[in-house]
Amino acid sequence: MARKNSGLSFVSRKKVVSKDLVGEILSTIFFCFAAVLFGVVLVVAFGLRTSVIGSSMMPELNNGQEVLIDRFAFKMLNPSRYDVVCFYPKGNENSHMYIKRVIGLPSETIQIKDGYVYVDGIRLLDDEHEKIWEPGLAEAEFKLGEGEYFVLGDNRNNSEDSRNGNIGAVSKDTMVGKVWYKFSKDDNSFGFVE
């Protein structure tokens, strides 16, 4: 009686690496390297790395924390409410760059009364921030011109921002760009800026 072959074989086969497999591996490595290189070139060409000075943007950004700024963002688009921006006060490039959050947009009227921000007479729902003790220039209605923005620090009672005369309304022309990424500073707070 003849024994049927069940298809199982215990003979080891020699694995052959084909030229196609080697070519595919090398092309994958090349494209990964090219993508990383392209990303680095984009960040260097359109980005800027700087450090936060002071505690005015806490808890989002801490003193000394490094951030990446997208210098290209506002060349095509306008800043939106709540964007975190980097700018030179009054366009003075000899000063250090300030990092603040956009609250008021062009042609809006801003006023701070009873510790809250009002935009065109309507209270801005901004419950995560404490009441503002010192309204500064925004105690009276503050009308923004074309291309002007009203900015505040997240740490409202410890911030030099649009309420102060030496900063005032921030022109889009003086903005360096949008802050989009933060690096860790001892507390593992890294990632995209909200």
Image (cartoon, rainbow, N blue to C red):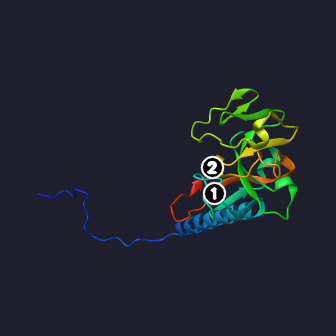
Q: Residue furthest left?
A: 1
In the picture of the structure, the residue carrying the numbered disc 2 is: 155
Q: Position of residue 79 (x, y in %)?
A: 76, 43
What residue lies at 84% left-to-right and 42% top-to-bottom? 148
Quadrant of the image containing the N terminus: bottom left
Q: Is residue 25 above or below residue 174?
A: below
Under circle 2, the secondary element is loop
Q: Is residue 88 left or right of 8 when viewed as pictured?
A: right
Q: Position of residue 147 (x, y in %)?
A: 86, 41
Crowding around mark 1 (Cα neighbors within 10 Å: few <14, some 14 to 19, many 20+) is: some
What residue lies at 71% left-to-right and 50% top-to-bottom? 100
Q: Position of residue 58 (x, y in %)?
A: 60, 53
In this view, the residue in front, 44 or 31, is 44
Q: Position of residue 134 (x, y in %)?
A: 70, 43
Instruction: Tell me the amino acid under the disc marked 2.
Output: Asn
In this view, the residue in front, 107 or 23, is 107
**Quarter where residue 27 is shown:** bottom right
**Quarter where residue 106 is shown:** top right
In this view, the residue in front, 177 or 151, is 151
In the picture of the structure, the residue carrying the numbered disc 1 is: 55
Marking on residue 116: none
Q: Does residue 28 appear in this view? A: yes
Q: Are marks 1 and 2 in contact (CB under 8 Å)?
A: yes
What residue lies at 74% left-to-right and 26% top-to-bottom? 121
Q: Does residue 78 appear in this view? A: no
What residue lies at 58% left-to-right and 64% top-to-bottom? 28
